[in-house]
Each structure stands twice: as C-alpha cells, then as structure tokens.
Image (cartoon, rainbow, N blue to C red):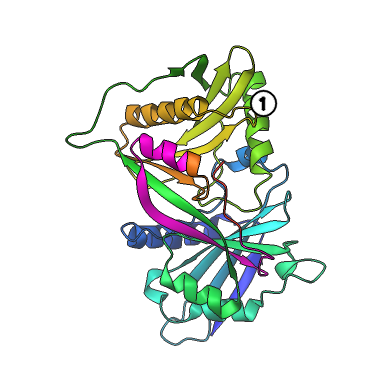
Amino acid sequence: MIGYEWLDRLDPPIEREVADLVASAAAFDQEMGFSKVTLRRAGGTGSRLFDPEPRTYHLLTRLTHNRRWPAQPLVTYLRLDVSCVHDTGTAHVVVRPEFRSLGIATLLFELLALDTSAGAGWSATGVVSVQAWAHGSHPAAQRMAARFGATDSHRLWRLCRPLTGPGLDTSPLPAQAGDVVVRPVSADEPGLAEEVTDLVAAIRNRVPCSQPRPEPDIRSAQFFVALRKSRGIVGALAVSHDDVAPGVSSIRTLAIRAAEQGRETALALLARGLACSRDREAQIAEIYVNPADEKLVNMCRTLGFAHDQTDICYTWPPAASTSEGNSR
C-alpha cells in the first residue's frame, strides 16, 4: 500500500529526502532522455517575470505497511507548478528507480482521482487543468495517458546542433543582420530588462501550454535583445546553461514582435544564441520549436539544427481540440 500527502513547502529534512530521490532518478535517467524534476521552479521568484503569482505544491508518496520496507521510504515525488494566468497546473513526476514498473504511479493517480470540476480544483490546488510533458514519446507515458483519458494536446520538437567535433564550421557567427543589432541584456539595466520581459511575457501568455524546460530567469540565464534603429526592441532570446544536461546549452524564449515579418531578426538572435553557447564551451545546443512553424524550423535547419525527439504535452481534462505548442 501507499500513502501520500500534499505540501506547499518542504521543510529541510523532507527537502533532503526529496533531493536524494531526485538525484537518484536523475543519475538513472541521464542516458535515457527522461524528464528531469527539480525541487522548485528554476530561477526561484524570477519566474514571476512571466507569471505574476506562481504557486508550487509538492506531493510525496511513501510505502506503508510493508515488512520489506519498514522505514516507509519516499517512492514518488510530484511537483505541481500552478499558473495563475491560465489556472493550469504543470505536473512533474519522478519515481524512485528501484520502485518503477510496479504500478505505483498508476495507483497514486487512482487514489487521487483526476477530478478538476470541484470549486477548489484538483486536490484543492485551484487547478482546473493538469498538464504533464513526456520527453521523447515514452511508452509508459502513453499508457498512463490512455489509462486516465488524458489527451495529446501539444507537441514540440527538440532540435539539437553539435558545437564540437571534426568538420564543424567554427567561424564567428554574425551579431548583426541588416540594421538589426543583437546585444546582451544585463539585470543591471532595469528599464531594458523590464521591456524585454514584457515582450516575452506577452507572447508566452498567449500560449495555453507550459514548456518542457523551465522559464528562464534574467538573473540566471543570458538574455539577448534585437534592436532596430527605426523601431527599438524588435525581439529577444534567452540562453540557459545551468538547468539542462551537462554540456548542453538551451536556447529559449525566442520572442519576435508581430511587425517583424522577415527572417533576419530571428536569424540574428539564433546566431547570437549559438555563439553564446559556443563561448560557454557547450557541446550541444538545443531549442524547442513548434513543428507547425515551418519558417522557424527551416531557419533552425539553416543554422545546423536537426530533429532529436518529439515531446508531448498530455492534458487532463481532455482538451476540446488538439493544437500544436508554440516555442515562441
């Protein structure tokens, strides 16, 4: 049997226990391409730049009444990030490796009941819709989704570009295209940083799905801004190095103003993101894109990116209609 409890914060002893489970799972899954769960949103309160009042809940599951495991070990950890923008919760679940393939996750969700119709939302968290990302279309995630009737609501492609190895073009990448100039943004430039975050948030808040990677924080990720002399800020991009696999640089939050119809702004930002990744001595650069955005996919291919895997966002209750995720 199992028992579970919801917490809105982790006290130090429990946090250490959860950290041990997460580290054990991360080491086991590193070569498998499975999702990586953290204790909290990357960037801490910096995520408030994209969601004004984010909340996080922690669900802990333990074995109970088991002679083999009298200490009632922690066997699963679920972190629920709640967006007040869409009343949507993004669930990140990890099962301790030695307890996998035993049906524990299935039993947990059967006990919880995925009922979001109550006034207080799912399990009194205020969530009216639950999302979870499966990295690489994992069969176990497909079985769980089918078991509970969750829909395949959004898909994103993970594109990767090698940055090291024989035969690669290592010539400098342009920081300017036409009259578009790309330069870094510092957290010490509050006016510019606020304008960039407003641009990114306006685009992200139109997308009704979470992203496979945490939102970047301007204090921990490197942000770049595209400036056009006649229009000011026309685009932005972030590069994160610290919350992905070792040697991987993640290019995120490509935000382009609607008036920018051409390719040069996006290409200049992407090129600068690659140059930043190379300068940080990353071996691989990744970017998530909407497969329906053919213009962006073609631009990434022009810069040497290739499809690595398809990530699927499952949604409960079932979405009214299936739509593609948006990397922008």
Please report the residue visible at 48 percent of the width from the left and 15 percent of the height from the top. Answer: 178
Give above or below for 198 relative to 123: above
Residue 97 place in picture, x, y as percent:
38, 70
Q: Is 308 included in the stretch rendered in magenta?
A: yes
Figure quadrant of the C terminus? top right
Give the residues drawn in magenta, as a range. 296-322
Give above or below for 314 relative to 216: below
Please report the residue visible at 59 percent of the width from the left and 77 percent of the height from the top. Answer: 148
**Relative depth, front residue between 70 and 28:** 28
Residue situated furthest top in the rendering? 229
Residue situated furthest left in the rendering? 166
Please report the residue visible at 51 percent of the width from the left and 33 percent of the height from the top. Answer: 238
Q: Is residue 242 visible?
A: no
Give above or below for 257 relative to 307: above
Residue 77 place in picture, x, y as percent:
52, 65
Please report the residue visible at 46 percent of the width from the left and 18 percent of the height from the top. Answer: 177
Q: Which residue is mark 1?
A: 194
The amino acid type of the residue labelled 1 equals: Glu
Residue situated furthest right in the rendering? 119
Residue 83 place in picture, x, y as percent:
69, 51
Q: Is residue 183 visible?
A: yes
Q: Is residue 231 left or right of residue 247?
A: right
Give the crowd class for mark 1: few <14, some 14-19, many >=20 residues within 10 Å: some
